[in-house]
Amino acid sequence: SVLQPCQPINETISVEKDGCPKCLVFQTSICSGHCITKDPSYKSPLSTVYQRVCTYRDVRYETVRLPDCRPGVDPHVTFPVALSCDCNLCTMDTSDCAIQSLRPDFCMSQRAP
């Protein structure tokens, strides 16, 4: 199989928040793909190794409205949309830096129709 380069792809994701009983699932553009990394054979306690991951370079932000939120709860959720991607250090502000994570369309609450 051929490793896909780091690039924007269409993906189904979910958004949800406390006070809103339904999860919204929709298509957006995220960064995905392979980044070349190096793992030194000799590891010194004084050296630091940084792994590069496929992450956002240019983004725009979009906002969706969650249905049936409780009174007083802001139903809007803003998320980044990938315009371009880059192999770089993982930024927790915009990326899931976990080694193993849930599917991007995973919902803890009921899915909105």
Image (tube, grey):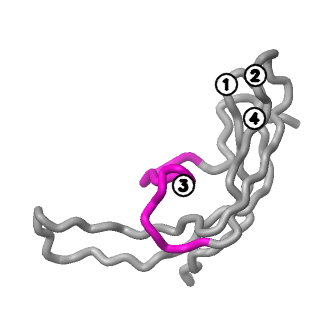
Look at label 1 and name its amino acid: Asp
Please tell me whether mark 1 sits on a helix, a strand or a loop: loop
For mark 3, what is the residue? 95
Please tell me whether mark 2 sits on a helix, a strand or a loop: loop
Looking at the image, is mark 2 or mark 4 nearer the viewer?
2
Mark 2–mark 3 contact, CB under 8 Å?
Answer: no
| Residue drawn at x 52%, y 52% as measured from the top left | 96
Q: Nearer the viewer, residue 63 or 3?
A: 63
Q: What is the x, y in percent for residue 55? A: 54, 65
For mark 2, what is the residue? 73
For mark 1, what is the residue? 18
Could you give the CA–CA distance between mark 3 and mark 1, rounded to whole angstroms?
21 Å
For mark 4, what is the residue? 23
Q: Nearer the viewer, residue 109 or 92?
A: 92
Q: Identify the main secondary structure in magenta.
A: loop
Local crowd size for mark 3, using a 10 Å CA cut-off: few (<14), some (14–19), many (≥20) = some
| Residue drawn at x 57%, y 75% as measured from the top left | 6
